[in-house]
Image (cartoon, rainbow, N blue to C red):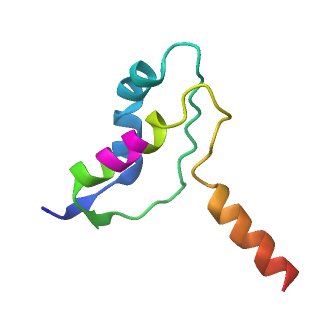
Amino acid sequence: MAPEAVNLNQIITGMGELLRTAVGATNRIETVLADLLSSALVDPSQIETCHFKLGDQRPGRDVRRGDDHDRNLERQARRS
């Protein structure tokens, strides 16, 4: 691995065309980026691979948003 400080929003937006090609024209991709995102110390190729695999495994299925997990955590915190 070769970690470096990267802007994850740039990596995600840079992969848009590749994902659109992989999932096909009949599937819609919605990208929701974080506001004021700090740089992350990661290996960019690992993030790209993970993002591609997540996007590619769901063709023809419901849209899955990356922020779903955060919303579920917020709901659980409100219930406590």
Q: Residue at x 24, y 63 (%)?
A: 5
Please identify the residue farthest to the left as the structure is shown.
2
Quadrant of the rendering where the N terminus is positioned: bottom left
Q: Position of residue 50 (x, y in %)?
A: 36, 49
Residues 26 and 33: in front is 26
The image shows residue 44, relative to residue 28, as above or below, that is below
Tell me the quarter of the image containing the C terminus: bottom right
Q: Is residue 66 left or right of residue 42?
A: right
Measuring from the top left, give residue 51's x and y in whole percent: 40, 45
Question: Which residue corresponds to the image point at 34% horizontal and 54% vertical from the top-left?
Answer: 7
Which residue appears at 57% of the width and 51% of the height?
A: 66
Is residue 7 inside the magenta stretch? Answer: no
Q: Is residue 72 above or below residue 7?
A: below
Residue 50 colored magenta?
yes
How many numbered discs, if any? 0
- Looking at the picture, does residue 10 appear above or below residue 59? below
Residue occupying the far top of the picture: 25
Tell me the quarter of the picture where residue 18 sits: top left
Q: Is residue 4 left or right of residue 74?
A: left
User: Which quarter of the picture shows residue 42?
Assistant: bottom left
Q: Which residues are magenta?
A: 49-53
Q: Residue at x 18, y 64 (%)?
A: 3
- Residue at the far bottom in the pictured view: 80
Q: Is residue 46 above or below residue 16?
A: below
Position of 30 compared to 62: left or right?
Answer: left
Please name the predominant secondary structure of the magenta segment in the image. Answer: helix
62 or 14: nearer the viewer: 62
Percent x, y for residue 71?
71, 62
